[in-house]
Image (cartoon, rainbow, N blue to C red):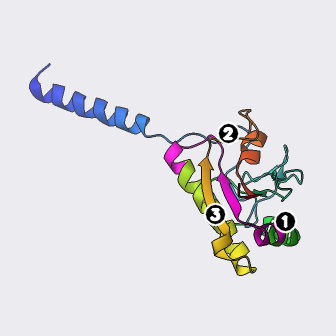
Amino acid sequence: MNRSTRWIFALGAAAALLLSGCAPKTPAPGTNPGNGGSQYGTEVPGGISSTGKYTGQDGVSASGIKMVYFSTDRYDVEPDQLQRIMSDMPKIQKLASSGKIRIEGNCDEMGTDEYNHALGLKRAKAVQSILVSNGIPSSRIDVVSYGESNPICTGHSAPCHAKNRRVEINKEN
């Protein structure tokens, strides 16, 4: 092999290695990244929307406040989740009036630790914004991101991932 052939071969091998090493994690089986024909997606089997948001009504925090669930890679609070927050606003106001509350952002295991920490923080801040706009003083709110380190469901399935994409509102200890 002459010098120019080796150079071309080395460049091709480096490009192939680079491209294969940068591939993103694939979505969990059963999730559909499409929007299902609406802004927030449609229901799919397993209690999750086509955008990956948990659609169950069972999640509550240790303080008894309903959990807020998010679609895959999203931090916008969808209308059904805004309703969950608003239905608990009297409880949240009572918690805030007796001390600080902590808004905890969480993610599933997909993505890097850094990405999930940042996404969890964005989710928590989105909920904080809603609480502040509804009269909760920002001085009474602490925001934290646990990224993927605080799962409530430890399976590796789409429904488990969906349950872990959440924000919890708790009394600050």
* Residue at the spot 12% in from the left edge and 30% down from the top edge: 4
Q: Which residue ends up furthest to the top in the rendered image?
A: 1
Distance CA(mark 2)–CA(mark 3): 31 Å
Helix, strand or loop at mark 3: strand
Residue assigned mark 2: 28
Residue assigned mark 1: 84
Instruction: Name above or below for residue 152 compared with residue 14.
Output: below
Please tell me which of labels 2 and 1 falls first in the chain.
2
| Magenta stretch in the rendered image | 94-115
Amino acid at the residue labelled 2: Ala
Q: Which residue ends up furthest to the left in the rendered image?
A: 3
The verdict on residue 79 being magenta is no
Circle 3 crowding by C-alpha within 10 Å: few under 14, some 14–19, many from 20: some
* Residue at the spot 74% in from the left edge and 47% down from the top edge: 162
Residue 157 lies, in percent from the top left, at 74, 36
Distance CA(mark 1)–CA(mark 3): 20 Å
Of badges 1 and 3, nearer the viewer stands 3
Of badges 2 and 1, nearer the viewer stands 1
Residue 15 lies, in percent from the top left, at 32, 37
Residue assigned mark 3: 142
Helix, strand or loop at mark 2: loop
